[in-house]
Image (tube, grey):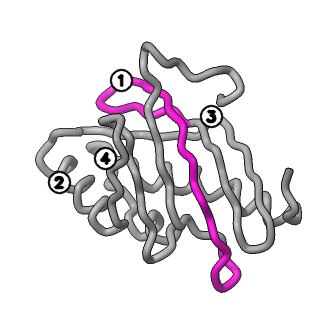
Amino acid sequence: MSLLSESDLAEIGAVLPRLYAAVGWSAERAPDWDAFRRCCHRQAMLVPMGSGAATPVPLDDFIAAMEEQRGCGAVRSLDEAELGHRVEGYGNLASVRSSFVATIDGVERRGVTFAHLVREEGRWLILAAAWENEREEAPLPGGLI
């Protein structure tokens, strides 16, 4: 259930696709870190769950780590796109569950991001986001796609 206006729901629903698009890179294009930052609160905390344990990373540290992977060639290409999402919210708070597909060096994998957004100065911004990639022993259920 959401107690937000249709325009709020549309704006909130567009934040994660913009974030996914901004983070990607290839030999032909660099990530758009300015657009990435515009999706996030200045004190946003990003939490990759790759190891199965929460590893909170401040926004600028996350960007630096991604640039390190890109710069040294550990990841030559990254492309992310949203498969679907669900938004719930009230007032100036919202939560988004977003399923995604990431293509890293030509290998596709899916996952789910859970993000908490706040409205600040009329804009919806990610305050915290945690994500986990699908694993063979734990495939994404149909309801998350």
User: What residue do we see at 49% from left, 28% from top?
Assistant: 110
Which SS class for mark 1? strand
Which residue is label 2 attached to?
68
In this rendering, would 107 be left or right of 73?
right
Q: Position of residue 35 (x, y in %)?
A: 47, 66
- Residue 110 belongs to the span the image colors magenta: yes
Mark 4–mark 2 contact, CB under 8 Å? Answer: no
Q: First in sequence: mark 1 or mark 4?
A: 4
Q: Amino acid at mark 2?
A: Glu
Which residue is label 4 attached to?
28
Judge whether 100 appears above or below 2 on screen.
above
Q: First in sequence: mark 3 or mark 1?
A: 3
- Residue 83 — which label? 3
Which SS class for mark 3? strand
Q: Position of residue 76 (x, y in %)?
A: 23, 39
Exactly how many numbered labels are in the figure? Answer: 4
Q: Quadrant of the C terminus?
A: top right
Q: Position of residue 43 (x, y in %)?
A: 43, 75
Which SS class for mark 4? loop
User: What residue do we see at 31% from left, 59% from top?
Assistant: 62
Q: Residue furthest front?
A: 53
User: What residue do we see at 42% from left, 63% from top?
Assistant: 45
Q: Which residues are magenta?
A: 100-123
- Residue 107 — which label? 1
Mark 2–mark 3 contact, CB under 8 Å? Answer: no
In this rendering, would 34 be left or right of 119?
left
User: What residue do we see at 34% from left, 66% from top?
Assistant: 58
User: Marks 1 and 2, how far apart in space?
Assistant: 20 Å
Q: Amino acid at mark 3?
A: Leu
